[in-house]
Image (tube, helix red, strand yellow):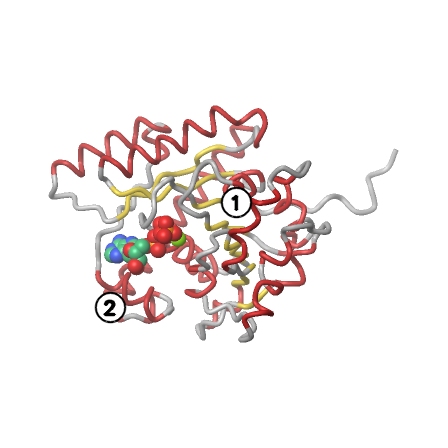
Amino acid sequence: MGAPAHPPPVLPPHVAVANHKGGVGKTSTTVGLAAAAADAGERVLVVDMDPQGNSTRRLRAQLPAALEDRAAASLAGVLPSPGRGEAARIVTSCGWSAPYSSRIDVLPSDLDLELLGLTAGLPGAERRLLRALTGVVDTYDLVLIDCPPSLLSHLTDNAWTASDYLVVPCEAEFESVQAARRVSERITRDRHNLNPDLSIAGIIPTRYRAALGVHRARLEDMAKISGPEAICPTRFPELAVMKTATEKALPLAECGSQGRDMAALFRDAYTWLRKRISHLQESAA
Ligand SMILES: Nc1ncnc2c1ncn2[C@@H]1O[C@H](COP(=O)(O)OP(=O)(O)OP(=O)(O)O)[C@@H](O)[C@H]1O
Ligand SMILES: [Mg+2]
């Protein structure tokens, strides 16, 4: 028997950015890693699975101005009953002006995405994002899925079912580390019916202050969740420029020297994440 005429495409890694805690830097990490990957020449699809729509706004992905048209042009319009590959109809360009941003596309979110949970009881409902992404992802090198700050939620189930790996931004504070541990526990507990292949690729320390003994101690706690090798060696400091970039919806690299330093940290973190994913892929083969 000869080789098939069209071998299946090699799919890009699908990475969900998640933690069971709000405000720890999930969206900042999604956007920062997307910029780093695009700057390195990769094509990136950012999937905004948070009804807050923060990565949609920060990447300046344009939705229609008319309120009644917005949901239809977002994942809120696609996911209730998606055809295979239907996400293609809402792919939106990143609106930044930097040359590399032409390599970033967004599946935008809208508030109505919150309503998806109302139909969570339909058969296969947690596979709706996966179905909508079929074929759409083939031309990208990386898919990043920004998750809401919830754990037992239908949106999280859809994001995790569609993902190969999780990246967990985590402050070196007790409750943030606890929340990261709950993420790990849920993967273990629900692996058999949600996604048997899902694993934590990395925990990324955010708002880290090395001078604080308590932060160093919490970093050791993080290492117990998925092993020290899963802790990203790049620690993100608390810097006002993150808020500037957030507020203005600009790439960090366009926010002065502090922003360029932070963008460089995201490039380091992304280089590490790529190596980590390659290692996990080789171990699984
Ligand atoms: N390292 C940092 N230094 C200073 N501010 C930061 C840092 N990381 C994130 N922030 C700010 O903290 C706020 C929350 O960050 P972000 O929106 O990324 O968190 P999140 O986990 O996505 O929140 P949510 O759970 O609401 O989705 C934002 O205003 C962001 O600019
Ligand atoms: Mg967020």
Classify mark 1: residues with Cα within 10 Å, few (<14), some (14-19) or many (20+). many
The C terminus lies in which quarter of the figure? top right
175 is higher (above) or lower (below) than 249: above
Query: Ligand 1 closer than 8 Å to the CB at disc 2?
Result: no
The residue at which mark 1 appears reads as 155
Residue at mark 2 to residue at mark 1: CA–CA distance: 37 Å
124 is higher (above) or lower (below) than 235: above
The residue at which mark 2 appears reads as 257
The N terminus lies in which quarter of the figure? top right
Between 20 and 8, which is closer to the camera in this rendering?
20
Q: Is residue 179 left or right of residue 137?
A: left
Between 258 and 50, which is closer to the camera in this rendering?
50
Q: Which image quadrant is residue 216 in?
A: top left
Q: Residue at x 48, y 44 (%)?
A: 16
Q: Amino acid at mark 1?
A: Leu
Query: Ligand 1 closer than 8 Å to the CB at disc 1?
Result: no
Q: Amino acid at mark 2?
A: Ser
Q: Position of residue 37 (x, y in %)?
A: 46, 56
Is label 1 in a helix, a strand or a loop? helix
